Image (spheres, helix red, strand yellow):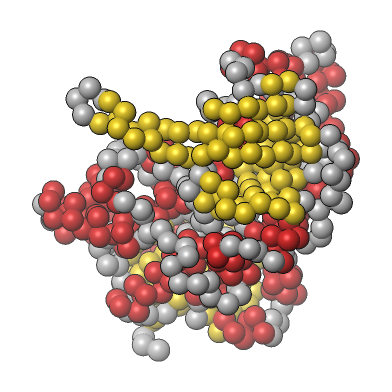
Amino acid sequence: MSDPILKIRDLSVAFSQGGKTNLAVDHVSFEISKGETVALVGESGSGKSVSALSILKLLPYPAASHPSGTILFKGEDLLDNDEEDLRRVRGDDITMIFQEPMTSLNPLHSIERQIGEILQVHRGMSDSEARKRVLELLHQVGIKEPERRLGAYPHQLSGGQRQRVMIAMSLANDPELLIADEPTTALDVTVQAQILELLAELQRERDMAMLFITHDLSVVRKISDRVCVMQAGRIVEQGPTKEIFDNPQEAYTRKLLEAEPSGSPPKTDESAPVVMKGDDIKVWFPIKRGLMRRTVDHVKAVDGISVKVREGQTLGVVGESGSGKTTLGLALVRLISSEGQIRFEDKQIDQYSFRQMRPMRDAVQVVFQDPFGSLSPRMSVADIVEEGLKIHAAELTAEERDERVVRALQEVGLDAESRHRYPHEFSGGQRQRIAIARAIVLNPRFIMLDEPTSALDMSVQAQVVDLLRDLQKRHNLAYMFISHDLKVVRALANEVIVMRNGEVVEHGPAKQIFDDPQTDYTRALMAAAFNLETAPEGVVSQ
């Protein structure tokens, strides 16, 4: 291994607020050589991202400070650099892939402009040169039909597609050090495998160093040379990846390695009443071109799908990003328009307007993928959870509403006193529990769960899966569980549908789908998720 390109020595990070100082990172030391991948692993709040953000001084200074330490990049201490010197390093010598692309991408700029800006600032490229390079990058990271995506805005892309755009931006200038902060969290298993392979290939070609931050230990095993395990701001164990996985020395490391969603879904009951049913559901988005904006084609996001979800049962919906999973769920709960018949219990609701659906929203609830985006930062937890009660249980007094809020928070494993705090004061797992509490406080019959565990570390994932299973049993809830994480789906779902390009490619009991998949595509998903033999070549393409 060559001399380290990055040396971090005794790094500490403190945050000051209201006269109090909290130490988030405590005397951390590690180094990375050219061509090497070092993984920082640990649970939420362990200090992984704070350590990484310190390298480029992207923390909220002056609230953040460094009581101790040096960060040497090619012999230069980045902590001593002024803003002008850092601007030359950022986006050129060192780049970063952030965890949440929706908050990192500019919602007002097209994809072409956002990637092209980096090339023009650091490389002085013309518009045509930048456009050509942008197309190359989008193709490299697996964006389908990149020419059609150049003018797209972030909100027009799926979560996985947005993350791929972030990766393209980070690789645009062939950096010497790439910091990847949970870069595959929002990606489905097959695309995750492709992105990891792409990063490894680019690293080999460029002899690029990589700092890889993740809570997914299966990813760490695939991509890293060395591992640093963080807990409460300290590195508690570090060493070669194989050594850490085969012979962990610390109890905390063993806990991380053992954390995985487990258990079984409730017993399948074919006689249970159907709570939600969709027949031949179609969601087609028009493609308009020309001066008159005439419709020339359609994107068939959901194309003739039929599903049913029974009381006390879970329907798992799996597939790659852009397969139509979330669109199907939003159609069933009438948050987007669709064709086809939709029945909720004894009511046909496919023709219901937004106003007609409103009285039923207490019985039909949604838990979204990103709790930080779906919880208002200006409202306390009590206000967030109570909001639905003010509409759907207006007869309750303020004291009765507060009792319901306390009970809901306790059901999801949160301290009732935390209801007076705000979302930013909670970890990702706690915010997802708040989102679940907001749903169950209304005593729903059906909950559509859209990737509710994708951004959570493994131990918290396992806790949330146990929580959802417990709530389902206690309240006889019907779940539609949308996910690209097949391990989570296996622990929760009675029945599974596998989607691709808006259509169902396989549908059946969960045990059959997982143990004996019938299509090459499903086998490819299973291979990527469970580290089985490689799927047939060309089955999964982006």
Give the quarter of the image for residue 480. top right
Placement of 519 over or under 272, stated as above or below: below
Q: Residue at position x 53%, y 28% from top?
A: 338
Q: Can residue 454 be seen in this view?
A: no
The percent position of residue 204, horizontal first and vertical second, equals: 35, 79
The percent position of residue 198, horizontal first and vertical second, equals: 39, 69
Quarter containing the C terminus: bottom left
Q: Residue at position x 72%, y 26% from top?
A: 344
Q: Which residue lies furthest to the top in this view?
A: 395
**Nearer-the-camera pick, 299 or 528:** 299
Placement of 42 over or under 496, stated as above or below: below
Q: Residue at position x 50%, y 33% from top?
A: 283
- Left or right of residue 316, residue 372 in this image: left
* Callout count: 0
Q: Residue at position x 65%, y 64% from top?
A: 517
Q: Can residue 196 be seen in this view?
A: yes
The percent position of residue 232, horizontal first and vertical second, equals: 65, 62
Give the quarter of the image for residue 366. top right
The percent position of residue 500, horizontal first and vertical second, equals: 52, 51
- Left or right of residue 447, residue 66 in this image: left
Quarter containing the N terminus: bottom left
Give the quarter of the image for residue 134. bottom left
- Left or right of residue 203, residue 363 in this image: right
**Nearer-the-camera pick, 107 or 377:** 107
- Left or right of residue 332, residue 336 in this image: left
